[in-house]
Image (tube, helix red, strand yellow):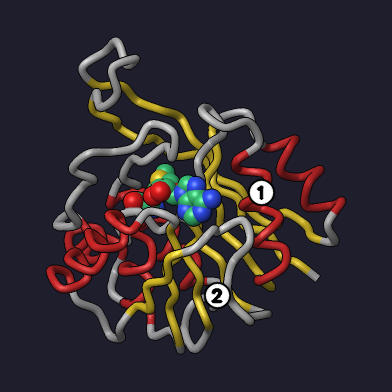
Amino acid sequence: MVSRRDLARRLESVADFEEPSVSLEQYLTPAEVAAHLLHFASTRDDLAGRTVVDLGTGTGMLAIGATHADPARVVGIDVDPDALALACENERRVGGSRDVEWVRGDATRPPLAVSGATVVSNPPFGAQRRHADRQFLEAASELASVSYTIHNEGSQEFVEAFAADHGGAVTHAFRTTFPLERRFSFHTEASTDLEAEVFRIEWR
Ligand SMILES: C[S@@+](CC[C@H](N)C(=O)[O-])C[C@H]1O[C@@H](n2cnc3c(N)ncnc32)[C@H](O)[C@@H]1O
């Protein structure tokens, strides 16, 4: 695994959505946040030699970043074909130690026969579609032995309760900041900092 700083530098060249969809909550995971999550996962031995699945891969930021940690396989799933085309372009630009398998499909009902994977995901927070992040967690509980998911501030109680109800446990949690530039018409500020939380869950 490259250093966190080198990974963040490489991921800086991942291009953002050109015409982000409001209903799909399309925004880029900042390179710094992706590098932090992936570097942490690497130190826990959750990436090397593993199947890594990025649910709601969008620009491919997390999937492409995961290829720098010697995984056995990386799959990026998104429902939006334009996002997957962008993710492919980003993969060509950034490179990595292996190819990502880009899959078009519903990440809440992933079209994959995989178990014991490591899931990484920055799901829709549910601002546009209530409980969107709950459905992504459900999918993670089915595919993964360990998952890393990013949620909006104040989600810890919900995520811990969800994990416990689905045979899992939150082992680590950390806060992070998303610097977001104005992208949707309902955003009133030119840029804003969004506080978010990352959870590592072990599923049994
Ligand atoms: C927060 S954004 C993506 C973040 C991504 N990690 C990135 O940095 O580009 C959420 C993504 O989930 C995708 N998405 C939303 N609902 C989905 C669903 N049901 N199945 C698959 N993808 C979905 C959106 O198209 C979007 O790309």
Image spot of residue 72 (x, y percent)? 46, 89
Tag 1, which secondary structure? helix
Residue 23 position within the rendered picture, expressed as x and y whole percent measured from the top left = 44, 33
Quadrant holding the N terminus: bottom left
What residue type is disc 1 on?
Gln
The answer to whether 64 is drawn above or below residue 5 in the figure is below
Residue at 29% in and 69% down: 3
Q: Residue at x 50, y 41 (%)?
A: 124
Can you identify the residue that label 2 sits on? 46
Which of 132 and 9 lies nearest the eye of the viewer?
132
Residue at point 54%, 47% (across, down) = 198
Give residue 65's position: percent from left, percent from top: 32, 67
- The part of the image, by quadrant, that contains residue 85 is bottom left
Question: Does the rendering let one see residue 117?
Answer: yes
**Label 1: which residue?**
135
Mark with earlier residue (1, 2) = 2
Q: Secondary structure at mark 2?
A: loop
Q: Quadrant of the C terminus?
A: bottom right
Residue 131: name its quadrant.
Answer: top right
Q: Residue furthest top?
A: 188
Q: Position of residue 179 (x, y in %)?
A: 30, 32
- Characterize the local packing of mark 2: few (<14), some (14-19) or many (20 or more) Cα atoms within 10 angstroms: many
Marks 1 and 2, how far apart in space? Answer: 22 Å
In the rendered structure, the answer to whether residue 165 lies left or right of residue 149 reads right
Q: Label 2 is placed on what type of residue?
A: Asp
Query: Is residue 122 visible in this depiction of the protein?
Result: no
The verdict on label 1 being within 8 Å of ligand 1 is: yes
- Residue 102 in which image quadrant: bottom left
| Residue at position x 49%, y 89% in the image | 49
